[in-house]
Amino acid sequence: MSDSVVLEMANKLAEECLAVQGEVGDDRLFMKVGNVLGASSQTLEEAFLTAVRTRMANDAARRFLAQKLKAHRAAQPDT
């Protein structure tokens, strides 16, 4: 799946989906969108799900790092 058009569509849709998902509070909305895509294009579905999951993983890793740094700084004595 090296079609740049498919990747571009998947990335744009992933960004939009995650924004809507956050606003409506449905943390599995991306799976529902994936099901809709899968009914027509398994290629786009796979690209979309990969795009969403990598963004969600990135966000989780960044939150983890921020928490670690906050905890580290809180444990340091004031100088």
Image (cartoon, grey):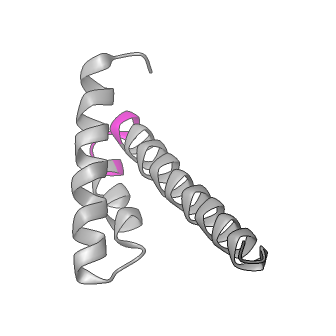
Identify which residue is drawn at 21% across, 55% down. 16
Q: How many marks?
A: 0
Q: Quadrant of the C terminus?
A: bottom right
Judge left or right: residue 27 versus residue 62: left
Nearest to the observer: residue 20 or residue 77: 77
Q: Is residue 50 above or below residue 2?
A: below
The magenta stretch spans which residues? Answer: 38-44
Name the image quarter holding residue 40: top left
Instruction: Report the side of 7 relative to 28 (left or right).
Output: left
From the image, which quarter does the N terminus lie in? top left
Say which residue appears at 42% left-offset and 51% top-offset.
Answer: 52
Please give the name of the residue rendered at 31% of the width and 50% of the height, measured from the top-left corner.
14
Task: Give percent across and percent down for residue 54.
Answer: 51, 46
In this view, the residue in front, 23 or 71, is: 71
Where's residue 53, x and y in %?
Answer: 50, 52
Residue 31, placed above or below residue 46: below
Q: Nearer the viewer, residue 55 or 27?
A: 55
Name the residue rendered at 41%, 64% in the picture.
31
Residue sticking out furthest to the bottom: 25
